[in-house]
Structure formats: structure tokens, C-alpha cells
Image (cartoon, rainbow, N blue to C red):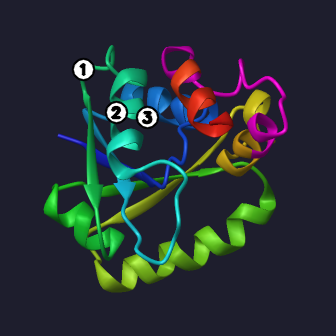
């Protein structure tokens, strides 16, 4: 059974994230979407909100489960028996950092591989940071976040 883990902060979940999740769910038997809990970061959305939004956005994907992790990603992958870490790449600029992380993860856990998945071209510009900025400045995030969580995300960002 091929089990994968797709990690991220998902602050908030975007259509780009959902694209990678759906495509991964078609390839692997099971996918853990792992919400990173990082005390050095100051997310806009709480861990509970990010989990809630991801669960709502993936509710029709029977082979996807939302989990959290704190600490080393490779240890989380091992804990859940995920032999593959999925990393989405939007642009070549993402590759250098992600490649270094993949090499470190391989050093820390030889049994875990990293798979780079190119984002769909329709989402290559999209990031959670941009979603937050557009919403705060009054722009539409209608096609940027999953419809099922759009209103809640917008409400939170516009206060």
C-alpha cells in the first residue's frame, strides 16, 4: 500500500493546495495532509481552523485524512507509515529550497522519499500569502480558495 504525506501550513488552504491533494489521492492508496504546527510562525488561522477548512475541502476524498505534526516532517511521515512526502512546486524558485529539504529528509530517514509535483499552471501564481493580502485589500478570493470554506476564510481575513 502506497501511503503519502502532503505537508504544509495551509494558512489558509488554497485551490492550489486542493489541486495537489486531489491529484495525490488519485495516485496513492492513502494521503495524509499534514498541517504543520510551528511555534516560530504566527499563522492567521488557528490549527483547529486550518484542520476544519481542510476537512471540509477534502470531505469527498475517502483516502485522505487531515493530521497535524510538530517537529521533523520525516518523523511525522514515519509515524504514519508514509513512505513518500509530496511537495508541490509552483515555480523553479521553489525547487532549490525544497530540494535541500528533501536531501535533509533523506539523510534523517532513508526510508522516506520526496516526490515533487508541479502545480497546475492555473494555480502557479497562487500562495496563501497572496490570498490573505488580496482579501485584506478588498479583492475577490472566489477562485483562489475552495468554495466550501470561502465565506469563513473571507470573514476571518476581513474581520
Does residue 111 belong to the magenta stretch? no
Q: Residue at x 58, y 79 (%)?
A: 100
Q: Earlier in the sequence, mark 1 or mark 2?
A: 2
Q: Is residue 64 visible?
A: yes
Q: Which residues are magenta?
A: 133-150
- Which secondary structure lies at badge 2? helix
Residue identifier under label 1: 62
Can you tell which quarter of the image residue 3 is in?
top left
Residue identifier under label 2: 52
Give coordinates of residue 120: x percent, y percent: 70, 32
Left or right of residue 68: residue 9: right
Q: Residue at x 41, y 70 (%)?
A: 38
Q: Residues within 10 Å of mark 2 (few under 14, many from 20)?
A: few
Q: Earlier in the sequence, mark 1 or mark 3?
A: 3
Query: Which of the labelled discs sits on residue 24, or is there none?
Result: 3
Q: CA distance from mark 1 to mark 3?
A: 12 Å
Q: Residues within 10 Å of mark 3 (few under 14, many from 20)?
A: many
Q: Is residue 128 above or below residue 25?
A: below
Amino acid at each position: 500500500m502506497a501511503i503519502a504525506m502532503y505537508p504544509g501550513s495551509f494558512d489558509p488552504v488554497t485551490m492550489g493546495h486542493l489541486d495537489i491533494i486531489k491529484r495525490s489521492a488519485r495516485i496513492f492508496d492513502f494521503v495524509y495532509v499534514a498541517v504543520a504546527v510551528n511555534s516560530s510562525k504566527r499563522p492567521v488561522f488557528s490549527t483547529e481552523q486550518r484542520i476544519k477548512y481542510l476537512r471540509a475541502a477534502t470531505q469527498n476524498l475517502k483516502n485522505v485524512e487531515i493530521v497535524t505534526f510538530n517537529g521533523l516532517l520525516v518523523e511525522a511521515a514515519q509515524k504514519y507509515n508514509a513512505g513518500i512526502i509530496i511537495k508541490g512546486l509552483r515555480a523553479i524558485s521553489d525547487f532549490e529550497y525544497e530540494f535541500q529539504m528533501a536531501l535533509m529528509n533523506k539523510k534523517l530517514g532513508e526510508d522516506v522519499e520526496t516526490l515533487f509535483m508541479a502545480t497546475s499552471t492555473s494555480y502557479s501564481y497562487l500562495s496563501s500569502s497572496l490570498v490573505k493580502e488580496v482579501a485584506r485589500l478588498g479583492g475577490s478570493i472566489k477562485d483562489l480558495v475552495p468554495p466550501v470554506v470561502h465565506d469563513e476564510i473571507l470573514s476571518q481575513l476581513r474581520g
